[in-house]
Amino acid sequence: MLEMLISGFASVFTDPTGIIMILFGVTIGIIFGALPGLTTVAGLSMFLPVTYVMASNIGLSMLTAIYIGGISGGLISAILLNIPGTPASIATCFDGAPMAKKGQAGKALGLGVFGSLIGTIIGVLVMVVLSPTLAIFTLKFGPWEYFSVTFFALTLISTLTGKSVVKGLLSALFGMMVATIGLSPIDSAKRYTFGSLQLTSGFHLLIVLVGLYAISEVLSTAAAKQEQVKVLDYKMKGLGFTRKDLNGNWINLIRSSLIGLGIGILPGIGGSTSNIIAYSVAKNSSKHPEKFGTGIADGILASESSNNASVGGAMIPLLTLGIPGDGATAILLGGFMLHGMQPGPLLFQTNGDTVYHIFASMILGTFFMAILMWAGMRMFVKILKVPTHILIPLIVVLCSIGAYALSNRVFDMWGLILFGILGLAMSKFKIPVPPFILGFILEGALETNLRRGLEYSNGNVMDVFTRPISAVFLILTVLSLGSTIIKQIRHSAKAAGKGAQS
Amino acid sequence: MTSDSKKELGVGIFFLALSVAYMLGTTRISTFTPFGNRGLDSRSVPQLIGFLVFVLSSVHVIQVLIQVKKSKQDSVEPLEGNRDQVCDTDEVICIEPPKGSIIARIDTVVPVKLLLSLLYLVIYVAAYQGVGFVISSTFFLLAESFLLVKKEERKRWTVFIILYSIGASALIYFIFTKYLSLFLPSGILG
């Protein structure tokens, strides 16, 4: 593994174009992260077509660099505007903005960047160590094991997101319905094509993702009534903080990073969840919880280290199982597929060089992110003043190029609009999007492995329960579903009780 | 019935109708089992998905109706989550923000802008192939930028938006076709 990583570094450092692309990707990511209303996913969607003609290792390194920059950039607006640049920086506002209001914006920014650096390093290092080991383990998987893992991932995301497990499951099944459009796996039977030649190949993953995430997000930002917000002034000397500011915070940093890593590994959710969980854990285990929210270092460090550690965490299921850890890694999955690679256990055997090139570039990108943010903060703060009426139409045009260039057909652009509207409707009716995405991505694997498993076992479905790994994942599925349903019944009983009392 | 309950009922009915249409659609899927049917065919999984959606949407509709009935009996509105809480986008966790913390929000949606943005996008896509990338993109950038810029600032931005729309479209076309080897429709510019 170490040898492969060294050769990954060698290939990164011997290619100046690659290094420039990583630097470019991190810069773009920070800009997208810093601008409120635009997220990492929009940045990835916008720059995806640029990578179409690049060598796969350079293109994918640039995309991962955008991801790292995007998660980190959110802290700038969280601290200086009191608006989270991305959902991953919500908790950064709690202490970052009050610290800035006290005239210590430079210190808040410096601490945020440091937290981001530590979080990303921990996340990426665990990813580098854990992914190849897990990939070796998952090589032992047969169709039943794959079926159980994908089934577990789908039910887990459906139970975790939103307030209703029924709506979560419906969303996942809706995604699976859309995925069945086109040719069936194994026997290539036409399904729901309505005689259309275009629908025979189904909807491309990137059309669904960019439509649901980027187009709907950009449209709702376009329609949002923009309030005039004031960018706070700041002064940052050196790193912005002293060693004293970190006293007593090392455990907080490591604990929050591990929380971010763990949340990132869970399918479908990432930094937007982990920063809030890490913040509340830091507050609950602090000796001075009353100081949280007044502008203390602990809160900023907890939020920023956890959301950045989710980057490495979310890459683990993507690389080892082909299951994206969050929205951004779902786009990355599309990027891998565009470059002719299928993330999963075989990726390390078939494209080991590219994977380790990406690992090395992610480590390099982490340091670029910190250096760029410390040295170029003034530039990024100026970008906060770029009006959205200039940026938003441009993002739509570039996303459209990405859709058109997939197969040189306007049909995919119509798909972009369709899924953009679907994303807006789902948000309006509070139907969680991540289960839909995962349902769409995993339907093929679920169906193929279920059918293969039954073929191998001559139609005997009991094999799925008797194989140990498969059985473990099915038990986990039952546990996660059962505990969520019990929790929701208790919650509604409690709410009904309160309603009757009032 | 509150507007939230109506929305939830609408979600349930939508999925119920979808599941029925989807299951009917499975009858048109051809199956191919040359070695005998030892497991599932191309129709089985869609049938299973349709059935599960039918069951879950029925559960959802029943849940909403029970909730509405209960709230009528107790003559109180069904309790909603604490509006002051801060949640992540996927609503996995919600917490009480620290006292005095107000995260500035930009979430008031202007429906006219949304509908017009969608209309411009539809026109853009419809014109993309025939009119060509440069002209359709120029008009889309112009229309969308003018729609989004604040009314009181429109005059100040006019010249910039016109130059930016033409320049950006031409530059993007040039970069993508010359340097990134992608095909973009040239349309009437030939």
Image (tube, rainbow, N blue to C red):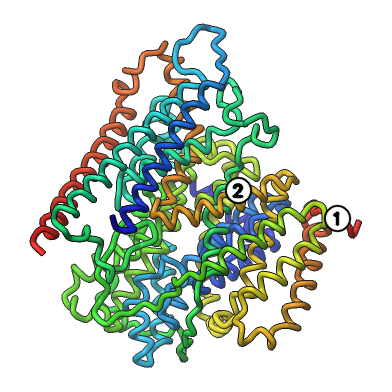
Q: Chain of mark 2?
A: A
Q: Is residue B126 above or below residue A193?
A: below
Q: Is residue B84 above or below residue A362?
A: below
Label 1 sits on residue = B187
Q: Nearer the viewer, residue B51 or A462?
A: B51
- Whether label 1 touches label 2, CB < 8 Å: no
Kind of residue at disc 1: Gly
Q: Residue furthest right?
A: B190
Residue at the image point whose x is 44% and y is 15% from the top: B39
Q: Would residue A77 be found to the left or right of residue A203 on screen?
A: left
Q: Nearer the viewer, residue A420 or A452?
A: A420
Q: Chain of mark 1?
A: B
Q: Is residue A100 above or below residue B167?
A: below
For label 1, the SS is helix
- Asked if both marks, 1 and 2, belong to the same chain, the answer given is no
Q: Nearer the viewer, residue A225 or A75?
A: A225
Residue at the image point whose x is 42% and y is 31% from the top: B49
Label 2 sits on residue = A207
Where residue A195 sits, quadrant-wise, is: top right
Q: Residues within 10 Å of mark 2 (few under 14, many from 20)?
A: many
Kind of residue at disc 2: Ile
Q: CA distance from mark 1 to mark 2?
A: 23 Å
Q: Please state the horizontal and vertical placement of residue A214, each as a whole percent of the image.
A: 56, 59
Q: Residue furthest left?
A: A501
Residue at the image point whose x is 70% and y is 51% from the top: A52
Q: Would residue A296 be found to the left or right of residue A489 on screen?
A: right
Asked if one can make out residue A361 in the rendered structure from this viewpoint, the answer is no
The label on residue A271 is none
